[in-house]
Amino acid sequence: MIIIHGSGLLKHIRVGGRALNLKHFEVVHCFSMESIHICDFDLVSFTFHGRPIDLRLRNLTKLRELNLGHQFVLENNVLGQISAFASSLIILSFRIYSPKNDFRPDPLPELPNVKKLTLTVGAHKDDYLRGFASIANACPNLETFTIEVLWYSPFRRRREARNVATRHPHQHLKLLQFLGYYGRISDFELAAYIIKNAVSLKKVVIDPCCQAWMESQICDEFFIKQERIARSCIQRQLVPIMPRGVDLVLL
């Protein structure tokens, strides 16, 4: 196992070769990093959180867990590289802090064995979040889907919900966890889409705590009020569409 956190010296990492017995590799917040090339050995898990770099993942046929963070997830054909080890992945996590408005990621290859998907998303105003469902749609055997929304602004915008009709059934999804459900229309659109498509859903866990990132400090009373509004929105938005037999848990 190799774990590198907060190094300001490393710029390039090259790791490869069949003789290498490295199973777990993690690089986080190394902001001088310019490139990471990993290839040709039996790596099991890889984590990278940091600024956009030249990331190349090649011939990693045993990779079971992939955790990528920051905006570069959407750049440098990182999503396209996943096709080379798509059949081995079981756990997939993305942190995308600054998606563009009306975000729709490039198509992913089918990920037939991914059972657990976690998305942490930074959003502005009332950004359209349904585009992130396409990542879940690439995982036909998904069992647990967790999404955490970090709003850059706590304020809501009134608009009509877009179409959330069933379009992509999930046959195996049993648990949906939505952290930072703030009661915005964007929250509802994404949650409703997943709920209506998950034909085997057993439990929905909602954390209505305000996850907003603030430019200036706001008093605790404000956040308490926003959480109260969020809980009211859950009753109005999600309870009426919850399928019979699905357990709704509010944290």
Image (tube, rainbow, N blue to C red):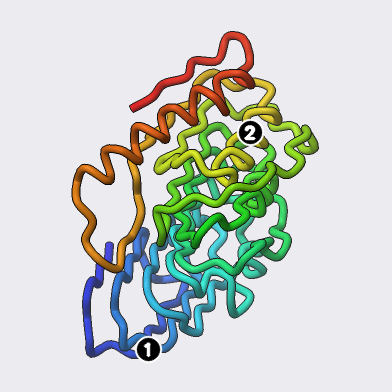
Q: Residue at x 38, y 24 (%)?
A: 250
The amino acid beneath tag 1 is His
Please state the horizontal and vertical placement of residue 11, each as a whole percent of the image: 34, 90
Q: Is residue 38 above or below residue 152?
A: below
Residue 65 appears in view:
no
Left or right, 178 with respect to 187, comes to left
* Crowd class of label 2 (few under 14; some 14 to 19; many from 20; radius 10 Å): many
* Crowd class of label 1 (few under 14; some 14 to 19; many from 20; radius 10 Å): few
The amino acid beneath tag 2 is Ala
Badge 2 element: helix
Q: As rendered, which of 180 and 216 lies closer to the eye?
A: 216
Mark toward the viewer: 1 or 2? 2
Numbered badge on residue 133: none
Please state the horizontal and vertical placement of residue 44, each as a whole percent of the image: 43, 55
Residue 37 appears in view:
yes
Q: Mark 2 or mark 1, which is nearer the start of the sequence?
A: 1
Q: Is residue 238 above or below residue 247?
A: below
**Where does the C terminus fall, quadrant-wise?**
top left
Badge 1 element: strand
Q: CA distance from mark 1 to mark 2?
A: 43 Å
Numbered badge on residue 192: 2
Left or right, 29 with respect to 161, comes to left
Please state the horizontal and vertical placement of residue 229, each as a whole percent of the image: 40, 34
**Where does the N terminus fall, quadrant-wise?**
bottom left
Please state the horizontal and vertical placement of residue 100, each as a whole percent of the image: 59, 69
Numbered badge on residue 12: 1
Residue 26 figure quarter: bottom left
Dot 1 and dot 2 residues touching (CB under 8 Å): no
